Amino acid sequence: MSNETTCFCKHCNKTVTFHVEPVSHLKQFGLTVVTLGLWLPMWIGMAMRPTKLCNECNEPLWSDG
Ligand SMILES: [Zn+2]
């Protein structure tokens, strides 16, 4: 298992180290209630793929190529 701790940041335009934003389930629950359940797929998506944040600019990193 490789323990990848770097990722390419489009904002910094270089490879950076990152940290993972813990999902706030209370906040996601609130959003799900407010949107009458429309937010639920987003919540599941976030729980499955935690957001990586660049350590330099704090912007989310999306490894979508
Ligand atoms: Zn960055």
Image: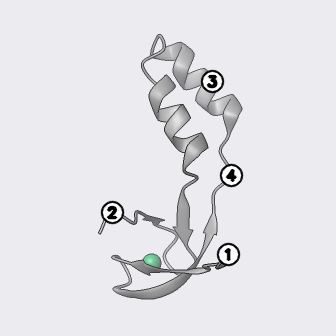
Three-letter code, disc 1: Met
Three-letter code, disc 3: Phe
- 54 and 6: which is toward the camera: 6
Of badges 2 and 1, nearer the viewer stands 1
Q: Secondary structure at mark 1?
A: loop
Q: Secondary structure at mark 2?
A: loop
Instruction: Read off the residue under disc 3.
Output: 29
10 Å neighbourhood of mark 3: few (<14), some, or many (≥20)? some
Instruction: Read off the residue under disc 2.
Output: 64
Give the CA separation, mark 4 to mark 2: 20 Å
Give the CA separation, mark 2 to mark 1: 21 Å
Q: Does label 3 or label 2 sit earlier along the sequence?
A: 3
10 Å neighbourhood of mark 1: few (<14), some, or many (≥20)? few
Give the CA separation, mark 1 to mark 4: 22 Å
Q: Secondary structure at mark 3?
A: helix
Q: Does label 1 or label 4 sit earlier along the sequence?
A: 1
Give the CA separation, mark 3 to mark 1: 33 Å
> Split into 4 quadrants, where in the image is the C terminus?
bottom left
Q: Quick one: which residue is furthest to the top in this view?
A: 36
Three-letter code, disc 2: Asp
Residue 62 place in picture, x, y as percent = 40, 63
Q: Does label 4 or label 3 sit earlier along the sequence?
A: 4
Q: Does label 3 or label 1 sit earlier along the sequence?
A: 1
Residue 35 place in picture, x, y as percent = 45, 16
10 Å neighbourhood of mark 2: few (<14), some, or many (≥20)? few
Three-letter code, disc 4: Pro
